[in-house]
Image (cartoon, rainbow, N blue to C red):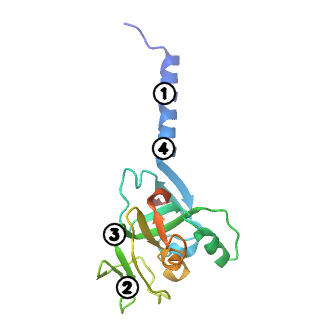
Amino acid sequence: MTRTRPRTRLLGGAVGVALIVVVALRTIGLLTVVTPSMQPELAVGDRVLVNKLVPEIVPLRRGDVAVFEDPGGWAEASARSRGAITHDTLIVKRVIGVGGDRVVCCAPDGALVLNGRPLAEPYASRRPFPLAFDVVVPDGSYWMMGDDRVRSFDSSGLADASTHGFVPTDRIVGRVEVTL
C-alpha cells in the first residue's frame, strides 16, 4: 500500500478549489443595480446574484428578473434621462413576454394584457402608463419591462427602434436569483 504524500493531497485540493472557482465564475455573477427602474423589488445600489446558466440550461420564464446585454440604445437612453454618461451594457428588467406571446398595453384598469388576459403584476407600480403597444414576441426573443414602468427604459419605449423592443435570447446573461 502506497501512502499519499501530503504535497500530492495539497496539490489535489488546490486543483479542486481552482476548478470550483472557475465553474462558479462561469455560472454565477454579481451585479450592482444602477437605475430605479426595478423598484420596489430592486433599488439603486442593490447587489444581485445572477444565475448564468439561464437560459441555455435553465429556462427563462415570464415574471423572471433577467440580466441582459444592451440590445441597442437602452443603456444610453437611460443614462441620458438621469443626466449621466454610461458605458454599462448590462440591463436588469422583468420578463413579460416570451416567443409567441402577445403583449398589449393596456386594459381599462391599466394592467398589461398577456395573450388576451390581464396580467397580475403585484411587483409593478400602478402609476398611469403613458405608452400604448400591441406586439407579438418573435421566437427567440423576450419582451422586457421594468417594475417602475414610468421610470424604465424598456421594450415598451423602444418598440419603434431597430430591435422593436425585443431582446434576443443571445443577449441574455442570466436570471437574478438573490438580492444580497
Q: Nearer the viewer, mark 1 or mark 2?
A: 2
Check residue 100 in the rendering and tell me which mark sits there, or answer none: 3
Residue 75 position within the rendered picture, expressed as x and y whole percent measured from the top left = 60, 68
Q: Residue furthest bottom?
A: 108
- The disc, 2 or 4, on the residue closer to the chain's N-terminal end is 4
Residue named by callout 4: 24
Query: Residue at horizontal 54%, vertical 64%?
Result: 71
Amino acid type at image mark 3: Gly
The part of the image, by quadrant, that contains residue 102 is: bottom left
Amino acid type at image mark 1: Gly
Q: Alpha carbon of mark 1 to alpha carbon of mark 4: how far? A: 16 Å
Would you place residue 155 above or below residue 17 in this image? Answer: below
- The disc, 1 or 4, on the residue closer to the chain's N-terminal end is 1
Q: Answer yes or no: do the residues labelled 3 and 1 have beta carbons within 8 Å?
A: no
Q: Answer yes or no: do the residues labelled 1 and 2 have beta carbons within 8 Å?
A: no
Q: Nearer the viewer, mark 2 or mark 4?
A: 2
Q: Residues within 10 Å of mark 3 (few under 14, many from 20)?
A: some
Please say whether residue 57 is visible from this viewpoint: yes
Residue named by callout 2: 111
- The disc, 3 or 1, on the residue closer to the chain's N-terminal end is 1
166 displayed left or right of 76: left
Please say whether residue 176 is visible from this viewpoint: no
Q: Alpha carbon of mark 2 to alpha carbon of mark 3: how far? A: 20 Å
SS state under label 4: helix
Check residue 13 in the rendering and tell me which mark sits there, or answer none: 1
Residue 174 position within the rendered picture, expressed as x and y whole percent measured from the top left = 46, 56
Q: Alpha carbon of mark 2 to alpha carbon of mark 4: how far? A: 39 Å
Q: Nearer the viewer, mark 3 or mark 4?
A: 3
